[in-house]
Image (cartoon, helix red, strand yellow):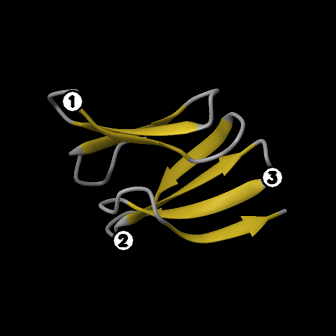
Amino acid sequence: RISSDGRQLISGDFDGKIRIWQLPSGKLLRQFAAHPSAIAAIRIAPNAGYFISSGFDFKVKFWWLEDKDTFLKQFRG
């Protein structure tokens, strides 16, 4: 997913890691283990400074875009 300002791309992988890339350079800004299994979906809240990830661990997490790897909230469903 690309942020609303077009400056960052957020990707999730089968290893449960989230990677945040700088655009247009493609430089990896940070990566972190978000879920113990594959990332199912990522959504970026427009103009809100956070994004949401869900994994096959049945958890949904809200993350700050600029903060290292701290999540705001976690829900299990």
User: Given the image, on which type of amino acid does mark 3 rest?
Assistant: Phe
Q: Where is mark 2, residue-wise?
A: 48
Q: Position of residue 41 (x, y in %)?
A: 62, 43
Q: Is residue 72 depicted above or below 27 in this figure?
A: below
Q: Earlier in the sequence, mark 1 or mark 2?
A: 1
Whole-angstrom CA distance, mark 1 to mark 2, is 23 Å
Instruction: State left or right for residue 49 relative to residue 53.
Output: left
Q: Earlier in the sequence, mark 2 or mark 3?
A: 2
Instruction: State left or right for residue 35 relative to residue 69.
Output: right
Whole-angstrom CA distance, mark 2 to mark 3, is 24 Å
In the structure shown, which secondary structural element does the residue marked by tag 2 occupy? loop
Q: Where is mark 1, residue-wise?
A: 27
Q: Earlier in the sequence, mark 3 or mark 1?
A: 1
Q: Position of residue 5 (x, y in %)?
A: 22, 53
Q: Marks 1 and 3: in contact by CB < 8 Å?
A: no
Q: Nearer the viewer, mark 2 or mark 3?
A: 3
In the structure shown, which secondary structural element does the residue marked by tag 1 occupy? loop
- Residue nearest the observer in this picture, 2 or 13: 13
Q: Where does the C terminus fall, quadrant-wise? A: bottom right
Instruction: State left or right for residue 42 relative to residue 3.
Output: right
Question: Seen from this angle, which residue lies furthest left?
Answer: 25
Q: Where does the N terminus fall, quadrant-wise? A: top left
Q: Where is residue 50 in the image (x, y as percent from the top left)?
A: 41, 65
Q: In terms of image quadrants, where is residue 14?
A: top right
Q: Where is mark 3, residue-wise?
A: 58
